[in-house]
Amino acid sequence: MAKYTVRRSSEDGIDRRGFLKCMAWAGTGAFCVLKGGVLKSYALSQMGQHSPDVMKADLSFVQISDSHIGFSKPANTDVTATLQEAIAKINALPTRPAFVLHTGDLTHLSNPSEFDTLDQVLKSLKTSQLFYVPGEHDVLNDDGKQYLDRYGKGTQGGGWYSFDQKGAHFIGLVNVLNLKAGGLGTLGQEQLEWLEKDVKRLKSSTPIIVFAHIPLWAVYPEWGWGTDDSAQALSYLKRFGSITVLNGHIHQTMQKVEGNVTFHTAMSTAFPQPAPGTAPSPGPLKVPAEKLHSVLGITDVNYVRGKHSLAITDSSLEG
Amino acid sequence: MKKAFISIAATLVLLLAFGLMTASYGRPAAGQANDSKDKHQVTIDNFSFTPATLTVPAGTTVTWVNRDDVPHTVASDDKKFSSRALDTDEKFSHTFSGAGTYEYYCSLHPKMTGKVIVK
């Protein structure tokens, strides 16, 4: 079984909708490499199995998500420790990542002490740069003011921004503010207008990496796992040959390819959530802490060319 | 033969353990009328408000209590009332003085909606 996720591009820059494998595991992150505009992601827990050559790339970075600092209930009463485990794995990588993206839910309750703890723990990361987008747990009670004060320097509106690295264009979007009754995640008109303008100057060959907390694809709208106006955002990007969307929020790994767009969701470093529709609600999956790895295990997500459905297979990490 | 029996027994134990684990995940839906001593209480459990529609006389104070492991809010659609984020077992109360239908939702998980009808 392949232990990594591969996305291939044909020479003309148009994606070949390939066969994809995706993994889920507890307490780690995803290591991403960008080579010739093609993004590959690897489970940090499987890094030892690859030769250093595999990791050589134009650019490599790591995504972590949903650290929920402050959460202290089953299945994880020490989310700070599991974040530290994830950081240790990142620091042990043979190739030092250019930066780390945190795709939100930094804290559980937006308490200042939780943000302080997160900052303190992340200081041990051996990387020069960290980029954030807020999750809904980071903007409680103040519409994100504290988040912006801490992490919003140089950002627009509710905290969105873009930056360029090694010829790739990264866009951090915020879809957890001003949520409407009955709806899903929301980007809002102001942010959509900014996005349209932001990408206008770029060549269509520029690799685009979008990251936001709530998935920008309809993972499971019944549980709010989607974004109401994501189609509008993606319409501004469709002329680009390679688009990668990185999300968190659902505390499990999933992947989907649609045209030139590859969607990934990352694991939480804190606690698992049930697979879509397998529980009465998307709340924390209660498993004994010592069973965390065995119960979560691996999720293979297979996408076969020409089929618009995902085949998901779970198997235990201990299996 | 004995070995086969042990293996079947072990499988049964595993299945039972898994069944218990699954069963303990979903708490029984709380707040279904007789569950609550206070009939003017709305329970938040499993990402839903129960009862989803509560009818009360004018002047009633309604209390929401969060039984989930994640925070929720109670926010009126037209901003007439709004709670702070309620952590597990935290409560929020609002007194409804005028008649009408008051629709509300959780501003963190907006799929969660409910209404209070004041007569």
Image (tube, grey):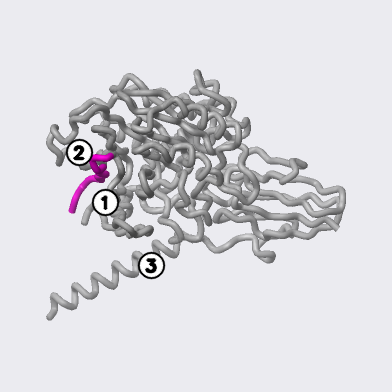
Instruction: Output the chain of dot 2.
Output: A
Q: Position of residue A153 (x, y in %)?
A: 50, 19
Q: Position of residue A90 (x, y in %)?
A: 27, 31
Determine the CA span between mark 3 and mark 2: 34 Å
Quarter holding the C terminus of chain A is bottom left
Looking at the rendered structure, the secondary structure element under dot 3 is: helix
Q: Residue furthest front?
A: A12
Residue A125 seen by the camera: no
Type of residue at label 1?
A: Gly
Instruction: Output the chain of dot 1.
Output: A
* Classed neighbour count for the residue bearing mark 3: other residues with Cα under 10 Å, few (<14), some (14–19), many (≥20): few
Tell me whether marks 1 and 3 sit on the same chain: no
**Residue receiving disc 3:** B19
**Residue drawn at the location 55% of the way across and 43% of the way down:** A229
Picture disc at residue A47: 2
Type of residue at label 2?
A: Met
Residue A262 or A297: which is nearer the viewer?
A: A262
Determine the CA span between mark 1 and mark 2: 22 Å
Residue A3 seen by the camera: yes
Q: Is residue B118 above or below residue A172?
A: below
Q: Quadrant of residue B107?
A: top right
Which residues, given as a range, are shown in magenta? A1-12
Q: Position of residue A107 (x, y in %)?
A: 48, 34
Quarter holding the N terminus of chain A is bottom left
* Classed neighbour count for the residue bearing mark 2: other residues with Cα under 10 Å, few (<14), some (14–19), many (≥20): many
**Residue receiving disc 1:** A18
Q: Main secondary structure of the magenta part?
A: loop
**Residue drawn at the location 27% of the way across and 57% of the way down:** A315
Q: Is residue B4 above or below residue A202?
A: below
